[in-house]
Amino acid sequence: MKKRLFSILLVWVMVIVMMPSAVFAEDNGSDHSQTESYGDFIDGEQVISDMIEKNGMYAHPRIIMTEEKFAKLKTHIGDDSVTAVLLEKLRNEADRIMNASVCQYEIPDGIRLLETSKRIQRRIAALAMAYHIFGEEKYAQRCYTEMKTACNFKDWNPSHFLDVAEMSTGFAIGYDWLYHWMNADQRAFIKKNMIEKGLMQVMDDYEDKPRTRTYRWYQDYPGDNWKLVCNGSMSMAALAIGDESDAGEIASAVLTYAYKEAYSFVRRAYSTKDGTYTEGLGYWDYATYYLGLHSSSLISSTGTDYGLADYDGLRKSVDFIRYMSSNTPKSFSFGDDGDSRDTGWTVLLWLGEYLQEPDISAIRIGKIANDSFNYLDLLWIDEDKTSDSKKESPTDWGEVGASNASFRNTWDESGIVAALHAGENRYKYHGHYDLGTFYLESNGARFFTDLGNENYELENRQYSYRIRAEGHNTLAINPSKELDQKEGAECLITAFSGGDEAYAVADLTDAYEPSGAESVVRGLKMIKDKECVVIQDEISLNAPGDIYWFAHTKGQIELAIDGRSAVVTVDSEKLWVGIMSEAGQFTVMNAEPLPTSPAVSNVTDNSAYRKLAIHLTNTQDTTISVACIPLKQGETKPSWIPSVKAVSEWTPQTIKGDVNADGTFSIADLAALQKWLLTVPDAKLTNWKAADFNGDNILNVVDFVLMKRYFMKGK
């Protein structure tokens, strides 16, 4: 009976595979009620009460680290663990600080104390940790000197509130970890400055009190990474002193405001669709590690974070980072991010611990030995809970209605990786006009990349080359002095399929409508067995006009005589790039504005980049199809070139096969079914319900997740 039921189930899956992908569409409705719901959280007074109940009065350390955690770290001194490597780096860092000058009040750009605040925070944390681990009083004494000097600053620069936030994080750690080393007068001095320069300043913002400074990060909606950095830091400071009589009232008020704002922002910032964080990968790191500090501080102090980080969008954001990075791993740097940054970040240790997924922590642990010291590693590392085995992950990521998609033929560094960025143009929140941009990397060589961020203080920055569409690997249509993509345009993934010929399609019409576009569709497809990536644009304009296609690289570009192909060389790796469609030729251009673009002074030097370009003139309806194929040693062109097929004809591969006479499937068919199931997200599998099928060999309702787990267990 079981054998027969399994055979019927396989038949049913084959029927489903051959159905249109729209059958699997999820409900895309928004739940606005969740945004303003604060779960079981009561208020800051309750948090302080919970903290006292858990630890007792004046119990320190309690901000993430405890006596037990320090003691556990010390057991690794001199062993062969990664933690031991970190501890040796900690000692070296603490000794380096001992030989450096004490930090001074410095605002080099006239706006930000930020680098000084970050430096002081890192010093306080490293020195206080070194004192606990190695027991040498010199580290505590120098730590107090750093704090005392910062207390004597005229302020912590609240006009740029990130500066206050970073400083308050350091002081929360220093006050808590050195509480028993300091005498009563020293504690009173540090606490007084934490309140006056930190907590009182943030209360002015929370309550929007009259003040001479004008920055209103708290009132901003929906806001950006500041929401998690500022609220997380101020919560840490409030937790450090909240059980003391002269600090309890303001600490409880800060905890109330900070929690509610951080909780709400988490539910705005991390997409429940695919985990995309709209400010890009670099700001995901900044925002998320402060969320980690906030959550960890609440848990260590009270036993719970009151549901702050318990959110599906945050869970999914781990995949956003992994899949929008290459195999090396380097970031796909859309928006205000640096070019190809390493994404093996420390925050992955916290997420692995919080989500109880050791393979996430393992990503960071594998990077620690070769990275510079980061005290956050010691806050969250727990090698006893980290698995050496890597979870088998699908190679394709994306879905209809999402903002990004990526593909690779393997997770090995030798593989080919490409990704497509869509989403929404939101310049205010670290966005660029880069919808449709892509990157491509093969065998560790980044062939097409993004240029990265531009100076925030630049006059007319919004119109600068790195921000405009022309400065990205996308299209420019009828360029002028105006923006070359529409501010506020939303262009999502309209079709997606994983597999041997995986692809994503985005409708970019909204972005180019002001430029005279009637329809603009971009697709990116990876043909894995040929290691080929196709970027295809199907464009229709209201009237004949100019169309530019751009792809930026740091590599060397060699054009074919006819201009229909080129070879891009990065180090010793080569990529053949060819135009498959009828119109157009390649040219090589400098990474600089078109003659029609506005002049912006003092922009970042882009001379390290060139761009491969196609320029079509007097064109109304066209297809631009470009194939990219890595060349093997000695090749000057690929042995195989794809043909052009309309994006509408890019269809998912189906599983083919016949039921055997005894009602079973062959091993090959089962392998194909297994491969397909492992590429489909659980949400898609569970949300589909069979409805109108009545044949003898059809089940009315199938739980596909059980099938997937069956195959995964077999692996």
Image (cartoon, rainbow, N blue to C red):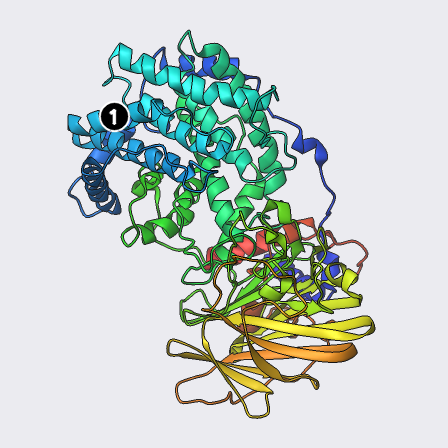
Which residue sits at x=56%, y=54%? 335
Dot 1 falls on a residue whose secondary structure is helix
The image shows residue 76, relative to residue 552, as above or below, that is above
Residue 302 visible in rendering: no
Looking at the rendered structure, the kind of residue marked 1 is Thr
Horizontally, residue 539 falls left or right of residue 590, namely right
The image shows residue 48, relative to residue 465, as above or below, that is above
The residue labelled by disc 1 is: 145
- Position in image of residue 637 (x %, y %): 50, 89
Q: Quadrant of residue 149?
A: top left
- Position in image of residue 102 (x %, y %): 26, 33
Q: Residues within 10 Å of mark 1 (few under 14, many from 20)?
A: some
Residue furthest bottom in the image = 561
Q: Quadrant of residue 261?
A: top right
- Position in image of residue 64 (x %, y %): 37, 29
Nearer to the camera, 419 or 154: 154
Residue furthest top in the image = 245
Nearer to the camera, 292 or 141: 141
- Position in image of residue 259 (x %, y %): 54, 26
Horizontally, residue 430 falls left or right of residue 14, namely left
Q: Quadrant of residue 491?
A: bottom right
Which residue sits at x=33%, y=28%? 65
Q: Number of labelled discs? A: 1
The image shows residue 427, relative to residue 213, as above or below, that is below
The image shows residue 271, relative to residue 226, as above or below, that is below
The quadrant of the image that shows the C terminus is bottom left
Horizontally, residue 246 falls left or right of residue 258, namely left
Residue furthest right in the image = 542
The quadrant of the image that shows the N terminus is bottom right
Which residue sits at x=35%, y=33%? 121
